[in-house]
Image (cartoon, rainbow, N blue to C red):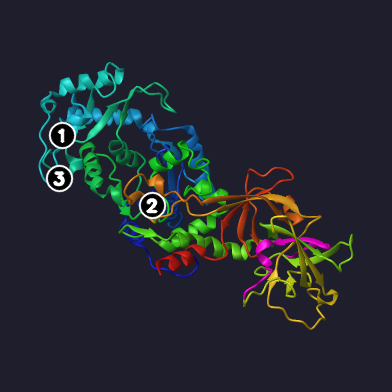
Amino acid sequence: MSEERSLNFIEQIVEEDLANGSTGGRVLTRFPPEPNGYLHIGHAKSIVLNFGLAQKYNGATNLRFDDTNPVTEDTEYVDSIREDIKWLGFTWEKELYASDYFEQLYEFAVKLIKKGLAYVEDATAEEIAAMKGTPTTPGVNSPCRSRSVEENLDLFERMRKGEFKDGEKTLRAKIDMASPNMHMRDPLMYRIKHAHHHRTGDKWCIYPMYDFAHGQSDSIENITHSICTLEFIPHRPLYDWFIKELDIYPSHQYEFARLNLNYTVMSKRKLKQLVEEKHVAGWDDPRMPTISGLRRRGYTAASIRNLCERVGVQKRDNVIEYSLLEFCIREELNKTANRAMAVLDPVKLVITNYPEGQVEELEAENNPEDPNSGSRKLPFSNTLYIEREDFMENPPKKYFRLGPGMMVRLKNAYIIKGEGVEKDADGNITTIYATYLPESKSGGDSSGLTVKGTIHWVSAAHAVAAEVRLYDRLFTVENPGAEEGDFKSFINKDSLQVIENAYVEPGLLQAKPGDRFQFMRKGYFSVDPDSTPGKPVFNRTVTLKDAWAKESAKAAK
């Protein structure tokens, strides 16, 4: 957004830190995704914030993969995360991994054991949870808490050597089992997982917990401003405790509200369920809130960055209207997308007084919002396809399209008058007959007639058959994750409608995957990678107007 805006609270903090010299006059942020799924639009806000801050203050941002759980991680996710960040328009200073620090983190753990601040636990996960108590009742000390430093060092080394099975031992920090903050009640630092890691292979069979690896990785990298979402507020005292007891660089954490979007889910676990159970066609299904899904649907990086700017940086969680995301892409594509003719529900129109076999090249502007977009030639003949909904045999009042005896303008072409129809045995219209006014040609109309309706068309002999996919919201309720029962029961069965045999103007045969168009009167569309030579596939990015809001308002009455 170009208009001047006031500083958000994190920018205010950064400017204060730069002014007082507490960060050594530099800004270093990081974006730390876990490579256990594809990034979604909520991550986009974090990316825009972290990279944007560094850009604004001539700093840098590290991309650090927090790969501490080998069971859920995959190089496919690493590759997709890299691609998404680059596509959004950002570059990182260093590409790093929490696994780069496994040896260092191990040494940190040994240091805490030597200080009497960590111990090896024999209890199961269930037993540990029971020991922790509740937010209103203090926990109880584990019998293992009194182990000697020497015994803990020996057991921890044996854990590393692989002498114990998964879940047989853990390493816990020794803090305060009566703390009002549950995260401070002797939290886990390490667990045993005999699993192959995507980078370290089988070198390790103990892995640091996220809460132990996260803050220390920030410290190792000398991150000046560690920006997290609000759910990490109760974790901050733990991160600060580790930093203090280890006497390492005091990277400081600041929390902001994540981006929540209605009519979708933002949990990676739930998104993964949708993919694995085949409710969608993959992580990049255009109905998914993933960055790759939005990209495939036709959203631009600029529109997503614009959404993040509009939403701003807050300290309280809120839910963003899906319609705001759609507004951002409409606003951009209205200015940048070339117009094109596409007929999605075709019916044949024969102009009986237009010479058979004659083909005329008509001029059509590419984008009325962009004076530099130029124009294109459209072939016109006596047999066209128009939308079935643009003709009615018995039209109601205020119907300004085609009907018997009614006149309408064909966009960029002539005024025509409905004359009659041909039907099949079931009474369905198969052909519409009309006549045209030769003197009514667009750009040189001397007929003196004014008509209220304009419809689009394609020449039947020149049109290209195309598949068109009409996408809508994936869920029928605003917050499917908060509803009772299985969130998947609220999937919108009409979220995808496939039109196998639409017709588009011939120039679109040359369109490449990712190219975007406004199909006149129909919406904004993008070429899908599934396109093949001779059969393009188009995804509807968004309708021309917010039809969902209109329907919702109607339903509320």
Using the numbered discs, state the Cα–Cα distance from disc 1 to disc 3 in whole angstroms. 12 Å
Image location of residue 319, percent across then percent down: 37, 58
Element at badge 1? Answer: helix
Q: Which of marks 2 and 1 is nearer the N terminus?
A: 2
**What residue is pinned by disc 1?**
130
Q: Is residue 475 above or below residue 447?
A: above
Location of residue 344 (image quadrant): bottom right
Q: Are marks 2 and 1 in contact (CB under 8 Å)?
A: no
Q: Nearer the viewer, residue 385 or 179?
A: 385
Q: Residue furthest bottom?
A: 448
Image location of residue 390, percent across then percent down: 67, 66
The residue positioned 54% from the left and 60% from the top of the image is: 329
Image location of residue 553, percent across then percent down: 44, 68
Amino acid identity at mark 3: Pro
Using the numbered discs, state the Cα–Cα distance from disc 2 to disc 1 in whole angstroms. 45 Å
Q: Which mark is residue 26?
A: 2
Residues rendered magenta in the picture: 373-396
**What residue is pinned by disc 3?**
135
- Using residue 499 as the reference point, say whether residue 40 is left or right of it: left
Using the numbered discs, state the Cα–Cα distance from disc 3 to disc 2 in whole angstroms. 40 Å
Q: Which of marks 3 and 2 is nearer the N terminus?
A: 2
**Residue 423 visible in the snapshot:** yes
Q: Residue 72 carries which label?
A: none
